[in-house]
Amino acid sequence: MGRRLHPLEGIVAICALFFVLALTVGFAQASGEASAIKVHLRSQSVLVQDAQSGEVVYTKNSDAVVPIASITKLMTAIVTLDRNLDLQQRVVISTDDMDSIKGTRSRLRPGTALTRDELLMLALMASENRAAAALGRTYPGGTETFVVAMNQKAAELGMTDSRFVDPTGLSAGNVSSARDLAKLVQAAHAYPLIREYSTRSDAKVVSLGRPLAFHNTNGLVRSHQWDIGLSKTGYISEAGRCLVMRVRMASKDLIVVLLDSWGKQSRIGDANRLRKWLESSARAGSRT
């Protein structure tokens, strides 16, 4: 006949059972919270990096080499500014600046005279292709020399996955990776004019006697809920919708790279999803 349990032994056994159950429930809850703050993005290549420490916060196919469309214009701006050209010099848009690759339209008609400064602003803020093309064409040595300088700068920045073939980004031959573009964003952020022009919400210029209004291609810069220090969008069919930013989120300065997202608003949706995820993660971390 088995030994009868002492009453105290029974109490200890029951307490142990409740302890195990509590741990199980706790782990299940923790797992549920973790899964609740996972982020699902439509962009095919993504990198979110702490701009101060370099820590990678989120990555998805960040080493894939893909077309980058008008993100190229960040390098166009850097090369232009590095040469210390006269930004007040007037540049006339010519037929050579018209898009022969994609056939895109522009309101900057041939004969329009703008300062190099205005062209830089329109290329960054409104992603104006003729403005970017004119910057390359009027560079000492012309567009060919300009493209060489773009690739030299990429090598200087350690962008080993990148290749540039024109100042506009219209060619699918302009390629990079999300990891490389984080380096480009970090470098571009050091230029006050790039920070200012890439985040300006709108501007007006006079073209052939007519005032023209231009708007930023990233609508988030007009939202008071976003603190954006640098921005650039891009799109061609081969690249999908692209967006890079240096932005303040979840009390951190972050570099955000979103590449190859399909759907007109998908890159903006991904940016909002990332922000929600980061803020939720920060709140969850503060509770632990």
Image (tube, helix red, strand yellow):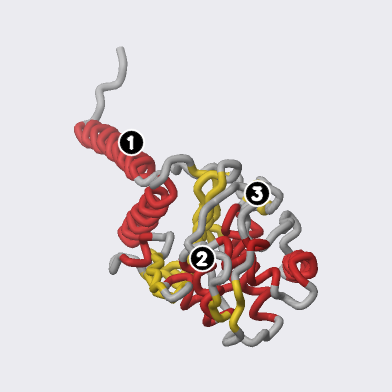
> The residue under label 2 is which amino acid type?
Leu
Q: Position of residue 102 (x, y in %)?
A: 60, 47
Image height of 13 relative to 164, above or below: above
Image height of 51 relative to 264, above or below: below
Q: Is residue 110 visible?
A: yes
Quadrant including the C terminus? bottom left
Which label lies toward us, 1 or 2?
Answer: 2
| Residue 101, label in figure | 3
Closer to us: 150 or 9? 150
The residue at which mark 2 appears reads as 108
Q: Residue at x 40, y 44 (%)?
A: 38
Q: Characterize the local packing of mark 1: few (<14), some (14-19) or many (20 or more) Cα atoms within 10 angstroms.
A: few
Dot 2 lies on which element? loop
Cα–Cα gap, marks 3 and 1: 61 Å
Cα–Cα gap, marks 1 and 2: 66 Å
Q: Residue at x 19, y 32 (%)?
A: 7
Q: Is residue 184 visible?
A: no
Q: Residue at x 50, y 76 (%)?
A: 195
Closer to us: 6 or 138? 138
The residue at which mark 1 appears reads as 24
Q: Position of residue 125 (x, y in %)?
A: 47, 68
- The answer to which of marks 3 and 2 sits earlier in the sequence is 3
